[in-house]
Every structure is written in C-alpha cells, then in structure tokens.
Image: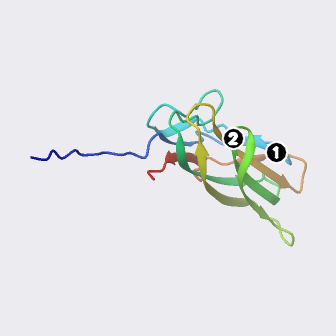
Amino acid sequence: IMAITKVTRHNTPAFEAYLSGDFTISDNTNTKVEYDTETFDTDGCYDNSTNYRFLPTTAGKYYVYHKATVHGNATQALDTVHIAVRKNGTRYETAMSTYTTQSLQIVTIVSNAIIDMNGTTDYLEGWAYARGDEATSVVYSARYKSIFGAYKLII
C-alpha cells in the first residue's frame, strides 16, 4: 500500500498596506511613504508603525506591487511624478510620469517587480517623488487607495 501525502504550499509571507489618510511629501524630494494600515500581513513581516518596511522571514522570489495616486495642492499642477520600490534602501523598481506640454493636478502610477529576498536582512519600502509648478508640498493620496504589497511566489 502506498501512502499519499498532501503537500500544501502558500504564497506567504504576504502583506498589503495602505494609507489611513493623506500623506504630504515635499516638492522635488524623494520620500518614503508611511503605509500605516494593513489590509493583511500573514506572518507579521510588515512594520506599519515605525520603519514602514517589509522584512520577510522566508527566502525566495516575491511579487511586489506599489500603486499610488499623487495630487498637487489646491493651486499646484504636477509635471513629474514617480514611485519606487526600494530594496535595502536602494531603488530597485521605478514607475514615472512626466508631462512636458501640460501639467496635471492628479496622477495614479503603478509599479511592480519580482524581487529575490534572502529571508533574513533584505527589506522593501515604497517611496514617492513629485515635482510641481510651485515650490510647495504635494499630497500622496489615501482617497484613491494608494497601496504597497508583496507575496512570496511558489516556484
């Protein structure tokens, strides 16, 4: 008689976080976004209160996504917006929008990547940058569900 063993594999660790309110970033400055509310965090690997980073405890390849809506202040139009996923503090993946003939008041950008993580010291963070036609701040918007998340791929 042959025994059959059921093998269960999961896409974990995994998390998704979003902003509980608008998050202001300075004009023309790269800023780490403080995603402070978790939709889910399967293994407690996302820090949503201090460092705002994902530090998975299992080595492997992770699908990482970052979606952000950025808008100018009441009188400010945007000409450049980009978001980035940083691995260990270094830019890994960036999505960017630049407007040369017209400026926009609001823009949504999506970035995604597959990133190797070592399961001990590697961490991921979501960053944003915006430049407008005034030297004022811009707002990273919670209203349009700006999110940051990742999950381990089963390969």
For residue 137, above or below residue 41: below
Q: Residue at x 31, y 45 (%)?
A: 8
Q: Picture coordinates of residue 140 (x, y %)?
A: 70, 47
- In this figure, which residue is indicated by the disc labeled 1? 137
Amino acid type, callout 1: Ser
Q: Residue at x 80, y 44 (%)?
A: 30
Residue furthest toward the bottom? 101
Q: Picture coordinates of residue 63 (x, y %)?
A: 54, 52
Task: State the image quarter where residue 32 is shown.
Answer: top right
Comparing 68 with 23, the one in front is 68
Comparing 1 with 149, the one in front is 1
Amino acid type, callout 2: Val
Q: Picture coordinates of residue 41 (x, y %)?
A: 47, 37
State left or right for residue 152 relative to residue 105: left
For residue 112, above or below residue 50: below
State left or right for residue 124 relative to residue 79: left
Q: Picture coordinates of residue 150 (x, y %)?
A: 54, 46
Residue furthest toward the top? 50
**Distance Cα–Cα, label 2 vs label 1:** 14 Å
- In this figure, which residue is indicated by the disc labeled 2? 33
**Nearer the viewer's eye, disc 2 or disc 1?**
2
Comparing 66 with 24, the one in front is 66
Residue 80, label in figure: none
Q: Residue at x 62, y 40 (%)?
A: 21
Q: Secondary structure at mark 2?
A: loop
Q: Secondary structure at mark 1?
A: loop
Q: Residues within 10 Å of mark 2 (few under 14, many from 20)?
A: many
